[in-house]
Image (cartoon, rainbow, N blue to C red):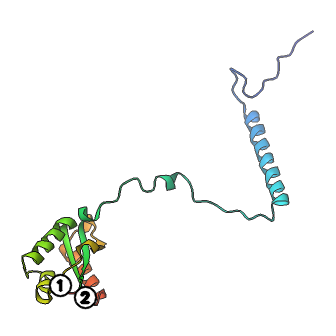
Amino acid sequence: MVRRPAARKLGDVGSSPTGSDIFRVFSSIFKFVKIVRKTRQRFCSNFQYFQTNFGVPTLFSHVKDRVRLEKRSSVIYRIPCENCDSVYIGETMQYLGQRIRQHKNDVSSKNEKTALGQHAFNFFHNFNFNSTAVLANENHNISLKSGRFVKCMVEIIKDKKCTH
């Protein structure tokens, strides 16, 4: 009696899958997916599905800490007056915290070199430096003085109560 070699099974140690083995596996997977789709359509047609936006990109979308307001530079900023509806809009390449300290010194020493100092001195008003807001950031690649100046002028024109 002649013995035939045993049939190889996918996953046997020392054997590599042939093309027909791979074809059988993929055709089985496709048949299974087809059956699952039909079953889902038959039994779950009344259910509504929703897709979540949860995934790896949402987990790591904000990996850097936000820069604190006083540590931001190349900005156009807005400081409101405490006593009236006027605001001061300025632009700086320095850290904003450093520029605010300069404004505070201008107000305390009655320096009228800026519109903020003039408003504080002429009307005896105080500015709310704690409510300073950044209106625009300057791109460091395009840090032309003229570009910042144009952005600043646009913000001043938009805000009708500006003291600048």
| Element on which disc 2 rests | loop
Taking the view exactly as shown, the residue that stands out farthest to the top is: 1
Mark 1 or mark 2: name the one nearer the start of the chain: 2
Is residue 60 shown left or right of residue 137? right
In this view, the residue in front, 96 or 118, is 118
Circles 1 and 2 in contact, beta carbons < 8 Å:
yes
Dot 2, how many residues are within 10 Å of its Cα: few (below 14), some (14-19), or many (20+)? few
Disc assigned to residue 50: none
Q: Quadrant of residue 151?
A: bottom left
In this view, the residue in front, 38 or 9, is 38
Q: Which residue is mark 2?
A: 84
User: Which kind of residue does numbered mark 1 sit on?
Assistant: His
Residue at 85%, 59% (x, y): give it.
42
Residue at 34%, 59% (x, y): give it.
66
Q: Position of residue 125 (x, y in %)?
A: 17, 84
Give the quadrant of the C terminus.
bottom left
Q: Which residue is mark 1?
A: 125
| Element on which disc 1 rests | loop
Q: Position of residue 45 (x, y in %)?
A: 81, 63
Residue at 78%, 26% (x, y): give it.
9
Q: Position of residue 82 (x, y in %)?
A: 24, 82
Is residue 113 shown left or right of residue 133? left
